[in-house]
Image (cartoon, rainbow, N blue to C red):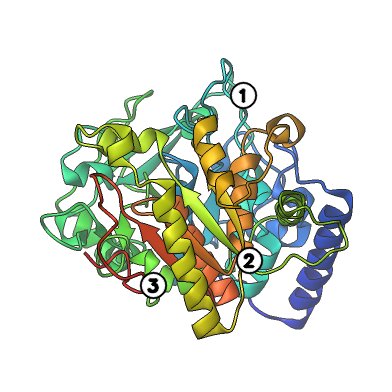
Amino acid sequence: MVVLLRRTQPYILAVALGGLFTFWYHSNLGLAPSVCEPLSSVLEPVSTRVLNGPPTTKFRDNLRPELKYVTTWHGDGISNDVMSYIQLLYLAKTTERVAIMDSFFPNAQHVGRGHKVPPKNLLFSEAFDVPRFMEATGIAVVDWADVKNATEDDEFDTLGCWNLEQLDGSDYPRLGQTPGQLRIDLSHTIVPEWVKIDANRRFIRLSALEMLGFPEMYEVAMRTQRPAKSWHLGVELPPDQQLMCFDWLFFAGEHRAADMYYDYSASWRHAGQHLHFHPKIERLAREYTRQAMGLSADQTIPPFISVHIRHNDFEMWCNGFPREECFAPVSQFALRVKQLQARLLAEKGVSATRVIVTSDEDSEEFWTEVASYGFVRPDHTNTKDEHGPFYPFLIDGAIQAMSHGIVGTDRSTVSGIAARRIQSWQDGLAYYVKWGSPHADEEGDVIRHALEQ
């Protein structure tokens, strides 16, 4: 049984026409599907291939008996969730399953910060160009909103799910908000010890998770593993075999921790690099970039370098150092920009004199210093009001992806994923500025891979 979308001629024609219409529709009207308009309303042929019909109150009523599915849930921060979702898409490919995508949740430390009433979730298909992704990869993708509609008055569905979080000794599985919103009660089973990349660390081997998607190794795992009671109904369910479920895939990898950042990464090569932003977001990124650079709508955006400076919630890892000693100064980022500009010219023949800075920093003093180097930034004064609370992050990500090089923040997944996009889409370069103690980044050559430590 193969779930990857076969490249038959009628299918290619349907997807091509659907993709062209979707691109025209979103590019010209500047609209993304609303949270009330799931992917099925935009890409009907694909959703009808992998689901029984429109969203149902009970998710099992919408799963086709001859197909298998795989899902995971949101965790902590959008960029971390993007990495988790890329791992899910890769597992969908290797296990021949339909990927059911969770939405992005407005985490209180990031998108939801400062909101008295939490904003609505953002559908995966509102953030990314799903038709383009499916055409490039053959992986079937739907939103949970395509599968199930639920209200607070509905009874709970139940689902057995693999628990990666507690394998590392955590007290609980990773518990997102969306299963409750979907009225799905999860019974978790801790994955067996042999799925770990390293017995002494928490990272999980993707190929081991892949094996759990097939009957023989599933049976081996269940000889030693036992399900826990679900949170609402108290039922004990083994991990579902038709709808394979994981609590969170951020800590999954292939050979070592965080190896999605490396050029050999299969999950990046087969899934991540094909996950382009939604056409609306790409259009807005071009508009914001032109505005920041003082360009008119008909002027070509020149090659540029993006800088990503992460502060706020990273302060918890400053180990007692005050902020001004913990975080690298703007001058250090400016130095790395000069070095990266020289490398781009020497190695790629690209002259990137313009620089755009994105950051979670609110200090006006900080931004005044940024401007003193001739660097510019996107103006997000009205972005949330005009487009929604997720859009500053998404637009910044699309701007970074348009650049030919990035000077990012070490240990930031925002910087790391931006660098991978730049390397894949622009044949660009990246450097990650170290921080955490005084003068942390002053040693070493810009050519050195920042993850080699």
Q: Give amino acid for label 1.
A: Thr
Residue in the image at 71% along x and 49% along y: 292
Q: Nearer the viewer, residue 398 or 407?
A: 407
Q: Is label 3 or label 1 in front? A: 3
SS assignment at label 2: helix
Q: Residues within 10 Å of mark 3 (few under 14, many from 20)?
A: some
Residue in the image at 40% along x and 76% along y: 263
SS assignment at label 3: loop
Q: Residues within 10 Å of mark 1 (few under 14, many from 20)?
A: few
Q: Which mark is residue 404?
A: none
| Residue occupied by mark 2 | 133
Horizontal and vertical percent for residue 178? 50, 33
Horizontal and vertical percent for residue 313? 38, 34
| Residue occupied by mark 1 | 151
Q: CA distance from mark 3 to mark 2?
A: 18 Å
Residue 134 found in image quarter: bottom right
Q: Give amino acid for label 2.
A: Phe
From the viewer's perspective, is 221 left or right of 302?
Answer: left
Residue in the image at 69% along x and 66% along y: 132
Q: Residues within 10 Å of mark 2 (few under 14, many from 20)?
A: many
| Residue occupied by mark 3 | 265
Horizontal and vertical percent for residue 301? 74, 65
Tag 3 and tag 1, C-beta contact below 8 Å: no
Q: Nearer the viewer, residue 17 or 27?
A: 27
SS assignment at label 1: loop
From the viewer's perspective, is 392 left or right of 31?
Answer: left
From the viewer's perspective, is 16 left or right of 89?
Answer: right
**Residue 150 visible to an observer of this rendering:** yes
Q: Is residue 406 above or below residue 427?
A: above
Q: CA distance from mark 3 to mark 1?
A: 40 Å
Q: Give amino acid for label 3.
A: Ser
Task: Say which quadrant the C terminus sits in.
Answer: bottom left
